Image: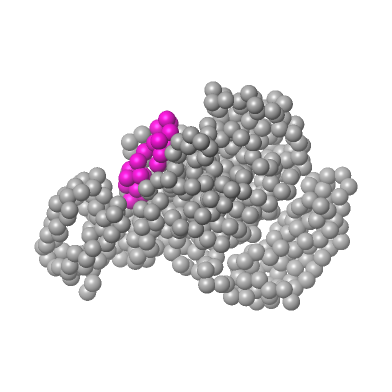
Amino acid sequence: MQTIEKWGMLEISAPGRTEGNPFTDYTCTATFRGKNETVIVDGFYDGGGIYRARFMPSFEGEYIYEMAGSFGESVSGTFTVTAPAEDNHGPVRVVNQFHFAYEDTKPYYSVGTTCYAWAHQPEEVHRQTLEELDKGYFNKMRFCVFPKHYIHNFRDPETFPYEGTPVDNSDLCEENFSYQVGFEGNHWDFTRFQPEHFRRIERCIVELMDRGIEADIIVMHPYDRWGFSAMTSEQDDLYWNYVVARFAAYRNVWWSLANEYDLLFQKKLEDWERYARILCEKDPYRHLRSIHNCMAFYDHSRPWVTHCSLQRQDLYRHVEFTDEYRVRWGKPIVWDEISYEGNIDMGWGNISGQELTRRFWEAAMRGGYAGHGETFVDEENDILWWSHGGPLRGESPARIRFLHKILEETPGYGLRLGQGSFDETVGISDNPASFITGNGGYEIHYYGFGRPSFRDFIKPEGSWKVEIIDTWEMTVTDGGTYAGKFRVRLPGKEYMAVRLTRID
């Protein structure tokens, strides 16, 4: 009997009809039944006369399945679901309203990165990206299903999502990169997918899953010269249903309806709500769902939005609003775009590693999560991590990994903004005790670009362990144990923090 681990992915397949258009002319659904769940999913045509359906079991035990429809002969069988492997913690869920945890309750602290067109790159770049990811800097990656046309990214992708012929792009240059370019000359059949393109996305999802990284899949975006951003409602819906049928059974999937939805000028609010409805109806595993802005925030209070995926709206203040946005929307705040470490000419891509790291810490202390990107000019190959992946050059990734280690030491499931002086940001354990006893026995006082040489504290109750954190040098130094009023000596340099933990 076939076996699969809990939260693994089971795939069943069968040959079927190929006359006409197999992507649209036939039905295919699969039902999976166990003692504790019954899940019905759409199957999909994968080319070569083969239909497939995929399933992620949420319980251990014996299951039966049946795949049926007008595609051909039905198939059925049985399988056993075993305990999950040690590194398999299940899908990520929202926990305690503002934070995340895997389904097995292990806390998840998001430290993400963006590689928009990673899935569409040549094999050498793909390999280099995996080598960087193996260093453990990030546990979430944002990337696109559709190819992307934008500065530093004018080459055609390795594959296209539809059968057809793209326009000759030899005359495109940096003067013609703004959002959707004229689509004349492209010839696509938007009812016939190219399965190989979607297999590339699946390969990326699995490679990320094997490294403990969540795959934040950007389903739509505006940076387009091929016409994928201007499909009709019927073509969009066919695409959405196909994407969900193919990807939903992978446990590490997150859904981002769009990158910069408000630049997709052909789409209206009712379109985004319809796409969300498809997700809610067709994804039986309730993966996390978001939508990302350029200028105007989406209404994140919508019930289908599980967490807020934000891009900064102000040049100077952004992550500093994290605690206010938590109150506004009552959901986890994830800053997926707060400018990138690099040196390109665009203001969104030339901040220092120190500044990007500071923004990560500010977001974390206020009870939110931040995302990384890197945009260093590459005169030789024009390969930038933010779009292609490849080698990393910046100073922030190692510091982000260090922050993640600090966050993993948080009691409970995350931080929120606590009480502190005007010139510091204080993160405290975001659990019920902190609402009753002030800062709740766990505090991180972060000083950002301030440079105090000492800090005085008053703790009238209990004994407190003091640790001095150098967020840039990535060190934690024992500062002693104190009670009452005490002074902590600091080196008078930027990016320092003091962690206080009550020990009695």
Instruction: In this rendered view, identify the residue nearer to me: 340 or 369.
Output: 340
Instruction: In this rendered view, identify the residue nearer to me: 399 or 448.
Output: 399
**Image quadrant where residue 239 sits:** top right
Side of 93 where 437 appears, left or right: left
Tell which residue pokes out farthest to the front in this image. 380
Percent x, y of residue 208: 55, 57
Tell me the residue at 82%/48% (across/down).
22
Tell me the residue at 17%/67% (across/down).
480
Residue 241 visible in the snapshot: no
**Number of labelled discs?**
0
Side of 158 where 107 appears, left or right: left
Q: Quadrant of the C terminus?
A: bottom left
The magenta stretch spans residue 399:
no
Residue interval drawn in magenta: 341-361
Percent x, y of residue 402: 36, 57
Instruction: In this rendered view, identify the residue nearer to me: 408 or 206.
Output: 206
Tell me the residue at 70%/29% (across/down).
167
Seen in the picture, residue 438 relative to 46 is either above or below; the reply is below
The magenta stretch spans residue 353:
yes
Tell which residue pokes out farthest to the right in this image. 19
